[in-house]
Image (spheres, rainbow, N blue to C red):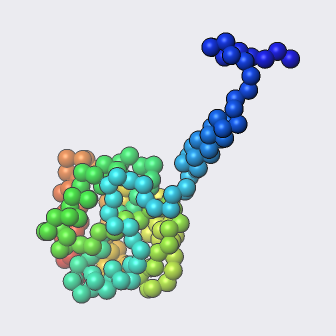
Amino acid sequence: MARRQDRRGKTGNQSPARRNALRKILACAVVAATPGALAENKRRFSLPLARDLSADAAAAAKAHTPILLFFDRDDCPYCERALREYLVPMSGEDPWRAKAIFRQIEVDQDLPLTDFAGAPTTHRALAMHYRTSLTPTIILVDAGGKPLGEPLIGLMTPDFYASYIGDAIDAAMKRM
């Protein structure tokens, strides 16, 4: 069996140290490419992840504000744009921060979550409860988790998306 020569004309096998280094690099690449390898949201822009909706509900009831649930999927470019250009800036501005509690739900992940009744559940199960299969989806709910209007599904006309969100928040506040 003939030995192969590399482009420098050298023959032989790779050193054990080099092989180990290549194995480690390959292992890291496999882990990084595995769906669900990270337990948290990997987006550059995100709202606070929903963790305890019963606590959020108590705060919403006290302030008489709705809870804005943003249903997100990690591989959704429209979700990223909605977060970057509309929801994250709105959630940080005083007029909007006082009008709603903003929370993000990862529809494709089993992140732990306490529901509105205080029971343990997951982000994926909550998304199934609200029948959200398309992302991005925004649903405004009251302190009991009851929807306060029709969901905003998709990134509708981007020029008017902030207005759609604002109108949905205002309508939800009137229904409370």
Residue at left offset 31%, top offset 86%:
58
At 50% from the left edge and 72% from the top edge, which residue is drawn?
Answer: 112
Quadrant containing the N terminus is: top right
Left or right: residue 11 versus residue 38 is right
Q: Is residue 174 above or below residue 153?
A: below
Indicate the position of residue 91 as horizontal and vertical percent values: 23, 64
Q: Is residue 98 left or right of residue 101?
A: left
At 43% from the left edge and 59% from the top edge, which residue is drawn? 41
Residue 137 seen in this snapshot: yes
Q: How many marks?
A: 0
Q: Quick one: 35 or 127, which is closer to the camera? A: 35
Residue 157, image x and y in percent? 25, 47
Furthest-left residue in view?
A: 95
> Residue at 31% across / 48% down in the picture?
81
The spot of residue 63 in percent (x, y) is: 21, 83
Q: Position of residue 51 (x, y in %)?
A: 41, 74
Please name whichever residue, 65 or 25, is drawn nearer the observer in this view of the structure. Answer: 25
Residue 138 visible in the current orientation:
no
Q: Quadrant of the C terminus?
A: bottom left
> Is residue 111 shown above or below 153?
below
